[in-house]
Amino acid sequence: MCVNGVRGSIHEYRNEGFIPQSNDSNAFFFHGGSEGLYASKLLHSSISQETGNNNNPTLKGKFFIRFETVTFVRTEESASKQPEMQQNTGLVEAIILEVKDKKRIGGSFLNSNLICCNPRLADAGSCKLGEVIIQKNKDNPDWPKRIKTFFAGNNRETKVDTTDVEINSTGMYYLYFMFCDPNLKGTLIKGRTVWRNPDGYLPGKMAPLMTFYGFMSLAYLVLGLLWFLRFVQFWRDITKLHYHITAVIALGMCEMAVWYFEYVNVNSTGRRPMGITLWAVTFSSVKKTLSRLLLLVVSMGYGVVKPTLGGLTSRVLLLGAVYFFATEALELVEHLGNINDFSGKTKLFWVLPVAFLDSCFILWIFSSLSRTLEKLQVRRNTAKLELYRKFTSSLVASVLLSIAWIGFELYFNATDPLSELWQIAWIIPAFWILLAYFLLVVICILCMDLGLFKKLGRFLLLWAVFCKMSRFSAYKADF
């Protein structure tokens, strides 16, 4: 399933069918894709290689939607009903629109629920019979864009002319293939469309994550170098726990670097390389699993209160293994499928097991913390007790932040069903990466109570907030 299509902004159609719009409508449609797109970047006059004319501007950062080998296949029964010599025996339209123009498709401006023009509206001169009703934008008469493709004679197949539709306005764009002729019922679509932004093939809402992953790679590198220096300095006091922390830092560094290079490759080629993507997904799953296990064993007092986990070791490893396989499956579905492969119900099927296991981790972590704090109070170990209280406060703050952020995500998705706020959508996944990094810094401070690490934690947190605010302001201004 995953190997078939690993693409960036390339939408593939594999003999898929059209869906009736509704009982009250008379149209059949197929959703060809949707992307957040930036306007083309127009350079000042430069020499055209083709014409040699100095007055012809060229496009360096051109954004376009390209139709490549998009083919419609109607049923044999439908084709046999058509005369062989007739030129146009069926019409399929490709409609490209910006989300703000969604009400311009259909007869709502004519007080009608119809999508396709009927004889009454055609006689009134409001539209052309058999075509999708479109109200043109007065400020931009060419939009929404309509591309017509006709079947000829009794041929079963027809192909959309290979063409590039240039975008000159930043926004969220939707592509629909539609037909109004009921005789075309059962028609299938195959081929692909290529969507490209001015700076590359990454979708608009994913492009900022490329810069973010680069920044996080450097942040993990700085943390790793400082941790290594302290690791060497206190090598006589090193325990197994410190090696586990080192492994999590190394995995985080590799994860962010691999994601960054994967995004760079997608941006330049439009395709997601299977090998790099699999490595990135696996690094991500391993790091998430080890991070949760690290929080759990620290909460149990491993390496601080007790030297081993005793009989709990097998349970901890079992929970970690189950979590790894669940999160690996979810990551594969999210990153190795085509952009619009999976419905909300399908994604929910993969998300629920991970959410349940995360809840198990949280409950076990806090119950273990409670018992560890009690032991430290009984032993009257003031220094370690103070560290664990700070650790508990950090965890509580993280959980509260997570709950608040989940609420924000639900509100964001509920109030923006058409992705009109696509330019700031990148901050949702970025928050979880920053939160995991923050918790890792806290554990480093806990396990080596060093003033330098405290300063590092404050500095990196402020730096992360500053960068996020800067990126947010920049994208909000562009929007």
Image: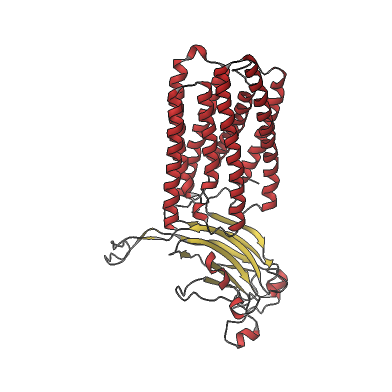
Residue 204: image x %, image y %? 49, 54
For the image, the number of numbered tags is 0
Name the residue at 52% across, 15% down: 238
Dividing the picture into quadrants, the one containing residue 20 is bottom right
Name the residue at 54% across, 25% down: 247
Name the residue at 65% across, 29% down: 365
Dividing the picture into quadrants, the one containing residue 358 is top right
Q: Quadrant of the C terminus?
A: bottom left
Residue located farthest toward the left when viewing the structure as drawn: 54
Residue 283: image x %, image y %? 56, 34
> In the rendered image of this protein, does residue 111 appear above or below residue 431?
below
Q: Nearer the viewer, residue 110 or 275?
A: 110
Q: Nearer the viewer, residue 313 or 194?
A: 313
Residue located farthest toward the top when viewing the structure as drawn: 236
Residue 38: image x %, image y %? 45, 58
Q: Is any part of residue 192 visible from this angle?
A: no
Residue 332 lies left or right of residue 254; in this view the side is right
